[in-house]
Structures are given as C-alpha cells and as structure tokens.
Image (cartoon, helix red, strand yellow):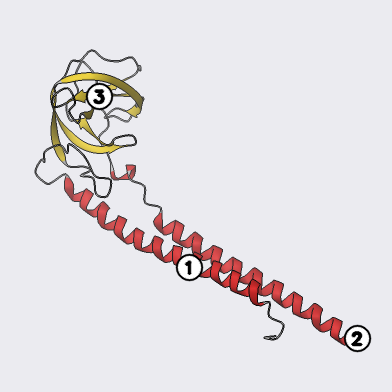
Amino acid sequence: MIRRLPIFVTILVLAAVATMVGLGIWQLQRAEWKNGLLASYAAASDMPPISYPAVPTTDNPPYFRKSEVNCLAVTGWRSTSGRNANGKSGWAHIAQCRTAGAEGPGAQVVAGWSERPEDPDWDGGIVEGIIAPDSQFVIRLVASEPVAGLEKSQPPALEDIPNNHLSYAVQWFLFAGIALVIFLIALRGRNKGVAQSGNLS
C-alpha cells in the first residue's frame, strides 16, 4: 500500500486535515477566552460606574458597566428594532450625541423606546445608563431612565453577546474527520482497482 500511495494527494489531504484541526483547537481557545469575558460581563453590573470611553477598543469593550454621558447636543438620530422593558417589540431610538467641542468623539445614547420610528424631540442632557454593544460604534449607552417621553428600552443582556466558538470547533473537527475518511475510502478503492488490474495482467 505504501508503494501505491499517491504522495502529492496524500500531502495535500493531510495538510488540509491539519489545518482544520488547528482551526478547531483555535476555536476551543477562543471559547475559553469568551467564557471568561462573559463571566466578567456578568459581574459588571455590581461594579462601580466608569467614565464613558471616548475611543472604545474592540478587544475588550466595557460592556454592562454603568456609566453616564453628557450629551451636549443631538446631532442625529437612528431608530432600530428593539424591545421595551416589558419585552414588547417596537423601536429603540439612538441619539448621536456631541460630547466635547465641535469635533468631539461623540457617543451613541439609547434614549428610550416607542412603538413608532419617528425621531423624538430631545436636545440632550446628562444620561445615566449601561454600556451595551453597538454594531456600528462598538458601544452605546442604554439610558436607565428614558427621556423625551419615551418608554424604557430593554437593558442589554449577556445573550446579546454571541458565543459560538465551541460549535465552530466541533464543525472543524468534523470536517477534518470527514475529509480523512473520504480520503481513506478513495485510497482503498484505488488500491483495489490497481490490485485487480495486476491480477488480470
């Protein structure tokens, strides 16, 4: 069988299998890191408030920490689908706030919730709340008490943070196993064909 082993194909398949196994191990490491991160987020609500980050980092954002923003002026609004504190579907109204000077870093503030997407009437002010994930700006502040006559938005939850690394690891290991089994089956069939050809000759 060693003599009939296709060297190039074997190297290619083994390299692919090794790569997939490596990716599975990397995802396991990511899963361990994410579990530790989620544990820190779970404990964040009991920690003292922090200053709102001017430039948040994507590596370890301070999600679920209490903070406040001094919204000097509202420069724009965006409305996204969201729920109120009772779980009712509607619109979360996010104010784009100027926080320091004309070219300040700004902040995204979830001012509250309503059933309609129209922009609320609010010019700004000091808002206390909880730092939550934001798909466009990394973080946003969800107001603990709504403004401009809005209802309270649903506070951020750990379920908002994706944690699929374990399932990804299992997928990579399965892909590696399937690729190896297919290769062995193909190799066995090839060797049988070669053996039969030799017997006929």
> Which residue, given by chain and number where applicable, does mark 2 sit on?
201
Q: State the image coordinates of residue 41 (x, y, percent, origin top left).
A: 22, 49
Q: State the image coordinates of residue 142 (x, y, percent, origin top left).
A: 22, 31
Please identify the quadrant where the C terminus is shown.
bottom right
Q: State the image coordinates of residue 130 (x, y, percent, origin top left).
A: 19, 36
Alpha carbon separation for disc pair 2 and 1: 42 Å
As drawn, the residue found furthest toward the left would be 48
Please identify the quadrant where the N terminus is shown.
bottom right
Hey, what amino acid is under mark 2?
Ser
Question: Residue at the spot x=14%, y=39% of the render?
Answer: 66
Quarter of the image for residue 118 reads top left
Q: Which of 190 and 40 is in front in this view?
A: 190
Question: Residue at the spot x=68%, y=77% of the render?
Answer: 6
Hey, what amino acid is under mark 3?
Gln
Q: Nearer the viewer, residue 199 or 154?
A: 199
Hey, what amino acid is under mark 1?
Val
As drawn, the residue found furthest toward the right would be 201
Residue 49 shown left or right of residue 86 in the figure = left
Q: Residues within 10 Å of mark 3 (few under 14, many from 20)?
A: many
- Label 2 vs 1, first from the N-terminus: 1
> Which residue, given by chain and number where applicable, does mark 3 sit on?
96
